[in-house]
Image (cartoon, rainbow, N blue to C red):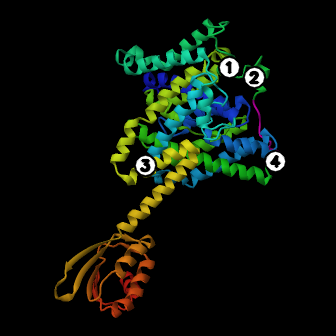
Amino acid sequence: MFKYIKNDLPASIVVFFVALPLCLGIALASGAPLFSGLIAGIVGGIVVGALSGSQIGVSGPAAGLAAIVLTAIGALGSYENFLLAVVLGGAIQLLFGVLKAGIIGYYFPSSVIKGMLTGIGIIIILKQIPHFFGYDADPEGDFAFFQIDGENTFSEIFNSFNYISPGATFIAFVSLAILVLWDKVLSKKGKLFQLVQGPLVAVAVGIIFFVATKGSATWSISTDHLVSVPIPEDAASFIAQFSFPNFGEISNPEIWITAFTIALVASLETLLCVEATDKLDPRKRVTPTNRELLAQGTGNMISGMIGGLPITQVIVRSSANIQSGGRSKMSAIIHGFFLLTSVILIPKLLNMIPLSVLAAVLFIVGYKLAKPALFKKMYDMGWKQFIPFTVTVLGIIFTDLLIGIGLGLAVGIVVILIKSYQNSHFLHLEDKSNGTHKIKMTLAEEVTFFNKGAILKELDQLPENTYLELDVRKTRYLDNDILEILDDFVEKAKNRNINIKLISERGIAENPSSYIEFFKLRSA
């Protein structure tokens, strides 16, 4: 596990700085205690990181669940009742893993996964623009188009220009310059610059700037533009931040409905993230999806037991891990320990980090996910790849993650149906002499009810006095709907003087009276 520690340790620091504001922001967006987001981040890093089969995936509280959590806490009557739903949701995820439901993760089209990554990259940049300029009305981690502060993604950006904080903006630009310089120049100059990551330097500079400009009327950064980790006064107040599920409500059907919703949505988000993370992995390792569901279920049960939010594998943290050179699961585990020790030992220092500096870090993460060259690459691959990709990107930007992916999947299925319609058969006109059309129709390897329209259209367009060779030698599956079409065509063929020669693996049949009976005998 410590084989790649020189790669994993620097990466874990970057993931820590990315995860910290997101844990707090998602808790705020969910209407939950701030500490609950940190608990989920810690459990996601240490517990799920250790149990998962993913080498570079990072888990924590998910923005995609924020709306569900916010609604559920109000509907269930208390946060303790909601925690019971989280625990039960984790147990349901364990069941999903045992039933091997993780196989679903292998059926997401590549174009949709690439669209998901690009859409998330763009939405990260758009959502961080207000924070970059020191306008923090919407909490970190709210990735939905319609925000909890009543604005949408673009109106929030325009509003931010009316509330620009000079100090926050200045240090954000300085941090961005440090990050670009580190990434493009210094990291290639020596091992020291690879070991000490640019985000760590940017955060350190941000803290120094905050301390140095305290009291300045122009350049000081107010506390509402800083990280806000809860600071307990003593050990008792620290322990008081933990909450526990109310098992007395276990018979409440509303609890079970919420639990199943959490399990289903969290599992889908995790499987999507696993597929996307595996694509980003430079070593192209494949994560065992059923094991991932078991790890996530265990994590959610533990998180719920001690007051944490629901957990999923998260693409923002995972991509930051990959971009920072993480090689094994140790980077995720170490980042979890960093979260744990920092909130206990140095919460006051963490609360000196300007959010605009962390926005600059996320700008780089977002850009690397959504490089403009990818759009050209997808366009060059043809419309069958580009349209689902584009719909997914736009869906994520203008709705949210799951709806965007759902739209992309729907378009992907339509594309598959269109291609299935087109590829059901091959027609070849062999001879037109003596007033007889000789046409050969070769059916595809699999012909299903999706192909009914295309085949029916071709049969209806056959001219009178046609000699049709119907070749099914390569066909391994012929749907009963297609056989019914052929049977219905028998009478039409007689009326239009169309002769049919059926060529199959078991022999040749001239003008068979019933295709259904022919293929029944063939299968027997």
1 and 2 marks in contact (CB < 8 Å): yes
Q: Position of residue 422 (x, y in %)?
A: 36, 67
Mark 2 lies on residue: 238
Is residue 428 in view?
yes
Number of disc labels: 4
User: Label 4 sits on what residue type?
Assistant: Glu
3 and 1 marks in contact (CB < 8 Å): no
Q: Position of residue 87 (x, y in %)?
A: 70, 43
The correct choice, above or below, for 321 with respect to 271 in the image is above
User: Label 1 sits on what residue type?
Assistant: Ile
Circle nearer the N terminus (1, 2)? 2
Q: Quadrant of the C terminus?
A: bottom left
Estimate the spatial distance between the alpha carbons at disc 2 and disc 4, rounded to whole Å: 27 Å
Is residue 283 in view?
no
Q: Is residue 51 magenta?
A: no
In front: 199, or 271?
199
Mark 1 lies on residue: 344
Circle nearer the N terminus (4, 3)? 3
80 sits to left or right of 269: right
Mark 4 lies on residue: 249
Q: Position of residue 412 (x, y in %)?
A: 46, 56
Q: Is residue 248 magenta?
A: yes
In front: 6, or 462?
462
4 and 3 marks in contact (CB < 8 Å): no
76 sits to left or right of 299: right
4 and 1 marks in contact (CB < 8 Å): no
Q: What is the magenta range?
A: 242-249
Estimate the spatial distance between the alpha carbons at disc 4 and disc 3, rounded to whole Å: 43 Å
Question: How many other residues sit within 10 Å of disc 4, few (<14), some (14-19) or many (≥20)?
Answer: some
User: Label 2 sits on what residue type?
Assistant: Phe
Mark 3 lies on residue: 111
